[in-house]
Each structure stands twice: as C-alpha cells, then as structure tokens.
Amino acid sequence: MSALPRLSTNRSAEMTNGVVHLGVGAFFRAHGAVYLSELMKRHPPNWGVVGVSLRRPDQRDKLKPQGFAYTALELSRDDAKPQTINVISDILVAPENPRAVIDAMSDRDISLVTLTITEKGYCLKSAAQGLDFEHEDIVHDQQNLDRPKSAIGFLVAALAKRKALRVRPFTVLSCDNLPENGKLTRKLVVEFAKSVDTDLARWIETEGKFPCSMVDRIVPATTDADLTKIENLLGVHDASPVVHEPFCQWVIEDDFVDGVRPALEDVGVQLVDDVAPYETMKLRCLNGTHSALAYLGYLAGHETISATVSDEQIKRFVQYLWAAEIVPAIAAPKNVDLDDYCAALMRRYENAAIQHRTWQIAMDGSQKLPQRLLATITTNLLESRSIDGLCLSVAAWMIYTRGQNLQGEPIEVKDPLVAHYQDIADRDLNAPDTVAAYLNLREVFPTELAANPIFRATVLKHYNALASYGVAKAIDGVLE
Ligand code: CS2
C-alpha cells in the first residue's frame, strides 16, 4: 500500500449526468472521457457519465475511494503530461444489480449511451450472420430481460422501459473497432427486440438513432510501473490511472435523437455525414497492421509494438503492406493523404514510451481479423492486387493461436474461439489440413473467401514458410 495521499475528485458540484457508458475499461477512460472532461470545462457540466462495468467490480472498487477521478497520463518520447479526469460520477457493476443499470439508462436526463465493449461484446455470430442467438448471454437475456447480462440485452431492456415511461429513446453510440459500428448495433438491437416484443422493435427502428463512429487512440494496459510513474510525478496514489499516446481522434456521424448531443465539435471531435471512409482507413491501415505486427512481432520474440517496428525488416514489411496492399484498396476521406496518414502511424508505433504489448493486441483475433485483414484481402482479390503480406499476417495468426511459438514454448491464447484452436492443434494435422481446418471457421472466414483457391494457396505457402523458416525468412519471401 502506498504511503502517499490518495487522488481525490474536485468535480464541480453542479455536474449532472447525461451519458451512460457501458464498458469502463482503459480505452474509454483515455478517449471518450477525456473529450467529455474537456467539454465540461467550457460548457454547463451536464454531460457527466454513469459508468457501467458489465462483468467485474475491479474498476468500481479502485475508483470509488477516489470519487471516480483518475489520471490520464499522456506519454510521448520525451514528455509525460498528467491530467485529472473528473467526469465519471459513479460506476455500476451490472451483475451485482442489473436493475440499477436499467434504471440509470432510463433516467430522462440521459440522452446518450456510449459503448466500448470490445468486438466480442456484441455477441455476433459473424458480421454477415448477425446476432448469435445461441450465445449464452443472449439466451439468458431473452428469458430474463429484467436482469440482462449482455450489452444488447441492457440496451433493449432500457429502451423498453423508456418506451413504457413515454420517454424519448437515448442515442446509442458504439465506439468499438467494428465496421459501420452504429448500423451494426442498430441491427443487433432490433433483431433482439423483435425476438421479445415486435412493437418495441418497431419503435426502436423508427425513433432510435445509432450513429456510426471512428475512435482512435493507442492505450496500452496500465502497469504497476505506470502507477509508480504517477506517484513520482504527482505525489499522490492513483489506484487506476490510464496511459495513452498524444494522438487522439473521434469522428462521429451527426445523427442523434432529436438532435440532442454534447457540443463535441468544440473539443476537436469531427461530426460528419458519413464516417465510412474514416473508419475503413483506420480499421485497415491502423488496426490491420497492428494485428499483423502483433502476431509476427510476438512470433519474432518482440514484446511490444515499438520493439517490433524497431526491427528494420518488420518495419519495411509494414510499409510494404500499406503501400502495396492496403492503401490502394481504400478511398481516402476528404482532405486526408493516406501516405501521410500511414507515415504518421509509423511514428506512433515507434513511440517507445508506450509499452503496447503484442500479446495484448493478439487477443481476440477471431473477432478482429475479418474487418482488419480479410476485408482488404477480398478487395484485392477482386481487383487483382497482391495479397501476400496480408496472407502472411493471417498465417501468423494461425501459428500463434495453435498455442505454441516457433520454439515450441506455450502461448497464452485469449480468444472466444480458443477451444476450436485447441481442437485443431489436438488433431495433430499436417500443414494443408491445419490451414483448411482454420479456413473452415465460419465465425472468421466468409464462405466465398475461404473457398477462393488463390487465397487458400497463398495462406498455405506463408504458413509453411513461417513454420519451417521463421518470421524473418517468411517476410523475405514477401519483400523480395
Ligand atoms: C489495437 C487497438 O488492441 C488492439 O487490437 O489494435 O486497440 C488500437 O490500439 C486502437 O484501435 C487504436 O485506436
């Protein structure tokens, strides 16, 4: 226990809540909450946040004794800038009291519900197939809508309560790295609502708003070393700070229920008519290469992204991926030069003050690959462009999720499909059969792509190269 005084809140007594946020992990606390905190300094403080932890009490337990204030520490190569964030007024732990969450969401002062629940929090069967009605939380919520477990269940339960109380719906703002995240969330909420109450589904369809958004800031998991850094900088103990890079971007489709929203444009948020070009750029240029770096970097023995790109050959590989396989496949948003965007991304990756573990990004690959890598592969196949570097990245994911690195040491694989990967490994198949078994995972690979002979052969070629010769030689095979 630290001998230093605890960080405490100096929140304005006038602050009222306007937002409920589901998923109070490090990303939201270093991104959306930072924008809202900035906003509250200039406007009447009526966009305070009630946070909801859908699973564990840890965040609430750490933050409650400090009045839900915490430090956001911006780290660049030669500077560390702490800022106290004071916009969260409470954190509700859903499993302890799901009704309290529904009540908070149906409060008429709340006009916005934001979400950072990660890809798997949406309980998707696959992007094309929609909601997974066999998911245990969805099955549970259909039968117990008064005490849901899933985010989708909470959204529907709270919207139902608002409808019954004749309160306007809140706007649902998804802030997760999924394509057309707003449209997708609308689709899942309406599908679920239809399965419990068709009138409600119709009301949500006609009255509800689900703007799409693109969010961007690199936020590694907080470590004990970060806690110490903050103690040294501020002379206080903060039980749950967040660390982040200087870069920050939030692009939101300007489509809110009755036009009611925080004036986020005053604090640098871009409110636009169409988020799609921003989102495609970010998912494919940033998240696509992030996943490639995570698997290849981990297999090459690198612990962090900055260490991975300090390997000159891997750096050249990422630059090749952008130039030859990713950028030519996408349309730039207005006034954005994609080459400049990618060059800036490389500088962000090189920021060694941010210790972003390859293992952290490698997590939940089954939920990430489709929008980050496979979508670009599909475009390139249609447009007869190279898919070599992207397929090497997919092959690296296959090797990684077998659960052993190239030296035969165990890897702790975190992914909803981990049992399937284990099953494939246990069958002790040869390389072509292993690749075929992976390509049969319909949760990840769309049928048409999985059947494409060029794609199959290219993944197998790189799988063999990686398994036989390691990362450096496999990359050589793409770059030469
Ligand atoms: C990362 C993202 O963990 C991951 O999968 O690719 O969290 C990434 O850091 C953010 O999307 C950056 O905005």
Image (cartoon, grey):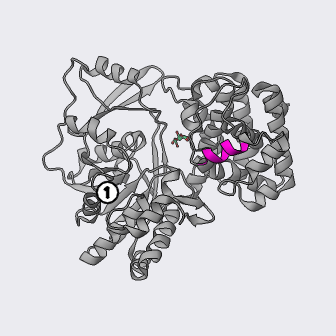
465 or 75, which is in the foreground? 465
Residue 402 forms part of the magenta stretch: no
Toward which corner of the image does residue 294 lie, by quadrant?
top right
For this orientation, the residue located farthest to the left is 13
For this orientation, the residue located farthest to the bottom is 199
Question: What residue is at 83 percent from the left and 40 percent from the top?
Answer: 431
Q: Would you say residue 474 is visible in this rendering?
A: yes
The answer to whether residue 318 is left or right of residue 124 is: right
Is 187 drawn above or below residue 443 in the view shown?
below
Label 1 beta carbon within 8 A of ligand 1: no
Residue 420 forms part of the magenta stretch: yes
Toward which corner of the image does residue 458 lie, by quadrant?
top right
Question: What residue is at 63 percent from the left and 26 percent from the top?
Answer: 308
Q: Secondary structure at mark 1?
A: loop
Which secondary structure is most common in the magenta stretch?
Answer: helix
Looking at the rendered structure, the number of numbered marks drawn on it comes to 1
Q: Would you say residue 168 is visible in this rendering?
A: no
Placement of the C terminus among the 4 image quadrants: top right
Amino acid type for the residue under numbered disc 1: Pro
Residue 130 in the image: state x and y as whole percent: 57, 65
Residue 175 in the image: state x and y as whole percent: 45, 52
Residue 2 in the image: state x and y as whole percent: 25, 19
Residue topped by disc 1: 262
Extent of the magenta region: 417-424
193 or 432, which is in the foreground? 432
Residue 242 in the image: state x and y as whole percent: 37, 33
Is 76 drawn above or below residue 432 in the view shown?
above
Placement of the N terminus among the 4 image quadrants: top left
The answer to whether residue 59 is left or right of residue 480 is: left
Q: For label 1, count other residues whose C-alpha is less than 10 Å away and answer few (under 14), some (14-19) or many (20+).
A: some
